[in-house]
Amino acid sequence: MKKFLRSPAVQAFLGLMLAGYLILIRRTTRWTHVGLEKVEPTLNSDQGAIGLFWHGRIPLCLGIGQVWWKKPKLRCLVSPSSDGEFIAQALARARFPAIRASSAKKGDSAKARAVVAAFREAMTWVGDGGVLIVTPDGPRGPNEVIASGSLQIAKRTGAPVFLMGLAAAPSIQLDTWDKVMFARPFGRGATVWEGPFHVPRDADDAQIESLIAEWSALLSDATRRAEKLVARRAD
């Protein structure tokens, strides 16, 4: 079954279906943005930026796309695995082209080289004024815990980081590792924006770990606030 699902034809079909869903939700959902003024100076500048939201909210991501499209250069970071292929295809169709990267397993030298190349590409992209969108707990989790990769990119480029809590109602939340949320059409969506945050260029491993804990808590809090906002508006 896995071989069938990962075949190019099936991946292309799944990518097309997901892209259609993403576009449908963007066009039929009434979005509210809280704290949008925090990102507006970056939107109106030539500076690159990094945006983080949780992996389980990928089906809602075009709610932030309509904000970030004000910048001329936008890409997202997606796993190079077979499971990530249809997501990358869907996002490309929805104007979110991907850089393929994720963490490598210990001992997998080929994957490690691919990761290094992708992170170099991501750093060049951000350094040249591009926006990079990352789901920092993907593709394997743990849920709502930021991995260090996005912070390392922020450290090396000096780019501001924005945390984006996403939610929609009515919606369906599946019992997956990331508690993925699918919005129903013609509902309400909300994004709670936090930032800008920065990683000092001289930050050591201990400081990075401290920021990971701090930013993970802030992003989860922003996500919970977005959930409460759409729940109140749906009443």
Image: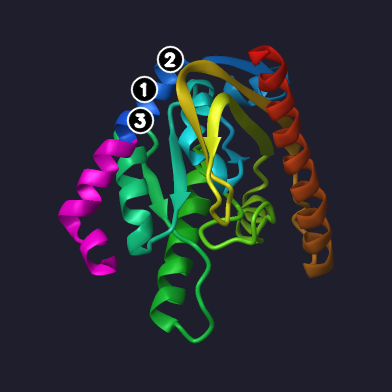
Which of the labelled discs sits on residue 24, or is there none? Answer: 1
Q: Quadrant of residue 20?
A: top left
Label placed on residue 165: none
Q: Where is residue 161 in the image (x, y as percent from the top left)?
A: 67, 40
Label 2 packing within 10 angstroms: few (<14), some (14-19), many (20+) = some
Label 3 amino acid? Tyr
Mark 3: give few (<14), some (14-19) or many (20+) Cα within 10 Å.
many
Mark 1: secondary structure: helix
Q: Quadrant of residue 18?
A: top left
Is 231 magenta? The answer is no
Label 2 near label 1: C-beta < 8 Å?
yes
Residue 229 image position (x, y, % from top left)? 72, 20
Q: Is residue 195 in view from this perspective?
A: no
Residue that appears at 15% across and 53% down: 9
Rendered residue at 60%/61% (across/down): 141
> In terms of secondary structure, what is the magenta stretch mainly?
helix
Image quarter of the N terminus: bottom left
Mark 2 highlights which residue? Answer: 28
Is residue 103 visible to the viewer in this orientation of the structure? yes
**Amino acid type at mark 1:** Leu
Q: Which residue does the image show at 69% across and 56% down from the upper left? A: 145
Labelled pair 2, 3 in contact (Cβ < 8 Å): no
Secondary element under disc 3, as helix, strand or loop, is helix
The span shown in magenta is 1-18
